[in-house]
Amino acid sequence: MNMCTKRCNFTGNLPPITSAPKLEVLLLWGNKLRGNIPNSISNASMLKKLELGDNLFFGPIPKTFDNLKHLEWFQISNNNLIRGPATDHEHLRIIDVSRNPLSDVLPTYIENFSKSLQYFYASIVRLQTIFLCK
């Protein structure tokens, strides 16, 4: 099941996701959604593609993000998020956290993405890390 609402001018907070066990694609890019990303995002446990970019979300990415084990595509650019995901997602191929005031340390698990990660975009952020090329 897919849900695409790109540039629909939705406003307000993202409501809790109470039951969406078959949702694989959630595209909310380019609206005017605000507030914290709800912890209930993890109720969509089969998500493969999540686009929340170009909204007004703020605060940290919820810890329940850890439960999205099938996630391949994660795009949250151009929001006001201060802390990135803190987990290892073995299937992630694309991560875009650009244009957020992220200021935490890039998690050490980033090295585990070497087999799956194809694209990591983090322009205009304040991540603190050192990349070592092997």
Image: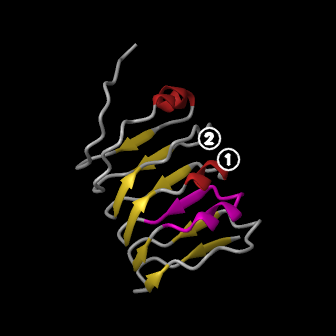
Residue 33 occupies quadrant? bottom left
Mark 2 residue type: His
- Residues rendered magenta in the picture: 37-52
**Marks 1 and 2: CB-CB under 8 Å?**
yes
Q: Position of residue 119 (x, y in %)?
A: 42, 41
Quadrant of the frame with the N terminus: bottom right
Comes first in the chain, label 1 or label 2: 1
The residue tagged 1 is 69
Q: Is residue 128 left or right of residue 45?
A: left
The residue tagged 2 is 91
Q: Residue at x 30, y 40 (%)?
A: 127
Q: Position of residue 95 (x, y in %)?
A: 45, 47
Q: Is residue 58 left or right of residue 93?
A: left
Q: Position of residue 9 (x, y in %)?
A: 40, 86
Helix, strand, or loop for circle 2? loop
Mark 1 residue type: Lys
Against 13, residue 106 (above or below) is: above
Residue 26 occupies quadrant? bottom right
Helix, strand, or loop for circle 1? loop
Q: Residue at x 38, y 74 (%)?
A: 30
Q: Which mark is residue 53?
A: none
Badge 1: residue crowd in 10 Å (few <14, some 14–19, many ≥20): some
Against 4, residue 22 (above or below) is: above
Q: Is residue 29 left or right of residue 90?
A: left
Quadrant of the frame with the C terminus: top left
Nearest to the observer: residue 39 or residue 115:
39
Q: How many numbered marks appear?
A: 2
Nearest to the observer: residue 98 or residue 107:
107
Q: Residue at x 29, y 35 (%)?
A: 128
Badge 2: residue crowd in 10 Å (few <14, some 14–19, many ≥20): some
